[in-house]
Image (cartoon, rainbow, N blue to C red):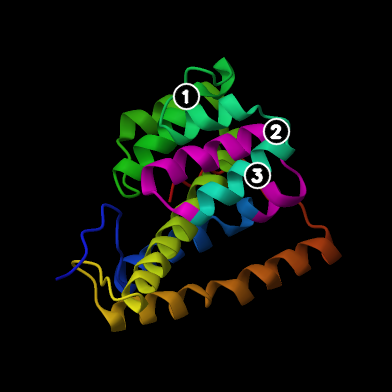
Amino acid sequence: MKNKFDKRIINVKTQNEDIRKFINHSDAFIEAQFNPVISKPFGESVSLAISQVNGCKLCSYTHAKNALKAGMTEEEVEFLLSGGFDNAPKEQLEALLFAQHYADTNGYPDPDAKQKLLDTYGEEKINDIMSHILMMMLTNLHGNVMEAFTLRLKGRAVEYSSFWQEIAVTINFFKVMPFILYKMLKYKFLGTKRNRNSVVFG
């Protein structure tokens, strides 16, 4: 009997679409790593909001630790991991709602939601917010597949998944790493500031 799994399981085709979106946004992502315009707690809050929807255990654990190091309280982290935004700073609320919506729609948000985000934050902040969202979508869904593979090794294979799908997705994820490493090294040594006034929603 296969194990029910209430998390999204992706295949290589879907993963490649997430990788494409991330690569299209990669210049803004690199700029956000070296020259962020949103605070560390803000970015970690967005990451936690995405991870809560996708249910990735490893990402939730990692970003909860990062959020605490960035100065967030345990109560704030717990609220985000429960899907609630009651304790979130007012200036983060629209971004967190959008992040949740983005994950709920599997990366195809409503145009009105995108416009509301733009009206609230402007282009530079949106590109930082989207950097966290796109990275978390990619890593969350990869993490879910790795969890499914771990369950399979324990004799609890996940419904609607297969051994070869899990192997292929796990390996395929790492093809984006050399590209990002190259971009980061190029930015660090050449120091070229990217254009942050072109919004990429994925």
Residue at 67% from the left image edge and 55% from the top image edge = 30
- The image position of residue 90, as x and y in percent, is 55, 15
The residues colored magenta run 30-57
**Label 1 Cα neighbours within 10 Å, binned few <14 / some 14-19 / many ≥20:** some
Where is mark 3, residue-wise? 65
Q: Secondary structure at mark 2?
A: loop
Which kind of residue does numbered mark 3 sit on?
Answer: Lys
- The image position of residue 70, as x and y in percent, is 73, 36
Residue at 56% from the left image edge and 32% from the top image edge = 77
Residue at 26% from the left image edge and 52% from the top image edge = 6
Instruction: Please tell me in which quadrant of the rendered image residue 178 appears.
Output: bottom right
Where is mark 2, residue-wise? 39
* Real-space Cα separation, disc 1 to disc 2, in angstroms: 15 Å
Which kind of residue does numbered mark 1 sit on?
Answer: Glu
Which kind of residue does numbered mark 2 sit on?
Answer: Ser
Q: Foreground mark, 2 or 3?
A: 3
Q: Are marks 1 and 3 in contact (CB under 8 Å)?
A: no
Left or right of 122 in this view: 103: left
Instruction: Please tell me in which quadrant of the rendered image residue 115 appears.
Output: top left
Q: Is residue 164 above or below residue 16?
A: below
Where is mark 1, residue-wise? 94
Does the image show residue 101?
yes
Residue at 37% from the left image edge and 81% from the top image edge = 168
Is 49 included in the stretch rendered in magenta? yes
**Label 3 Cα neighbours within 10 Å, binned few <14 / some 14-19 / many ≥20:** some
Q: Is residue 104 above or below residue 191?
A: above
Q: Are marks 2 and 3 in contact (CB under 8 Å)?
A: no
